[in-house]
Amino acid sequence: MKLFVFPHAGGFARYYTFLKNAQYQNIREVVLYEYANRNPALHKTQPVSFAERTERAADFITAETAGGEPFALFGHSMGAFVAYEAALLLKRTGRPLPAQIFLSGQRPPCTVEEGYFTANPDIAIPYLKSLGGMDQLLDAAPAVRSLFLPIIFGDLKLLETYTPSIPAPEERLRECVLLYGDHDAELEGRDLTRWTEHFEQVKSRHVFSGGHFYLDQYHDRVTEIINTETECIK
């Protein structure tokens, strides 16, 4: 089977190289998905909305699994929304569905308030710093900031257009696996049980000691969870 990995806002696919380098029982290939605004040379056009980003991800998954191979999705932070929305779009359009979906460091879409995401630097930069993991980049020299801030704020502009899909009960996806840090500022005060408004069940929940980027300290444990949750999938 294949595992498709969707990065966080401002993140590059290479951050998730540890998932690609791991050994799995049942995963033949790990595909690190790179968003269009990371490498414009590979993309003729840039998405103008989060819905378009989702559509592109769904179409990519379909093309990469045209032979009927089973697949799973892993998304962290913004990538969790991409993975969820892409999977729901696949279901709504009658295409093959992922055998498992791993959602990392993200609240249920149904808890996203209108206007929550903003590309206003006065609000966005303190928010990003509260999550940790980006401080060096956000405080870097102007030459470095000029390279990476457009990518970050490009993602935030797309998130400003995000309208979460709330499926009818019979339309919910089958199941998901949740992973998150116990001191994640993004999840503070959020009711994570509400993921069941999007899935028939949360198969398992894995809580790590750390913040939004708990992944930095738990490469081996995260890959072990993915391996365990996929080893019996046919």
Image: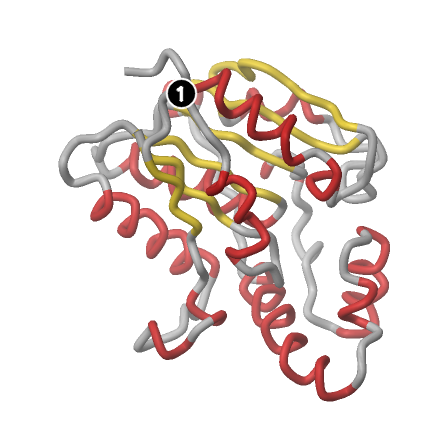
Please name whichever residue, 129 or 124, is drawn nearer the observer in this view of the structure: 129
Decide if residue 113 is on the left or right side of residue 20: right
Which residue is depicted at the point 64% across and 71% down?
153
Decide if residue 181 is on the left or right side of residue 73: right
| Chosen colour scheme | secondary structure
Q: The C terminus is located in which quarter?
A: top left
Q: Residues within 10 Å of mark 1 (few under 14, many from 20)?
A: few
Picture coordinates of residue 94, whole percent (x, y): 21, 33
Residue 196, above or below 145? above
Decide if residue 179 is on the left or right side of residue 70: right
Which residue is depicted at the point 81% across and 40% down?
211
Decide if residue 109 is on the left or right side of residue 141: left
To which quarter of the image does residue 100 belong? top left
Please give the residue where the numbered disc 1 appears in the rendered image. Answer: 25
Q: Secondary structure at mark 1?
A: loop
Picture coordinates of residue 217, whole percent (x, y): 75, 38
Residue 178, above or below 42? above
Name which residue type carries label 1: Gln
Picture coordinates of residue 111, whole percent (x, y): 67, 37
To which quarter of the image does residue 26 belong? top left
Q: The N terminus is located in which quarter?
A: top left
Q: How many marks?
A: 1
Residue 147, above or below 218? below
Which residue is depicted at the point 64% across and 18% down?
205
Q: Residue furthest left?
A: 67
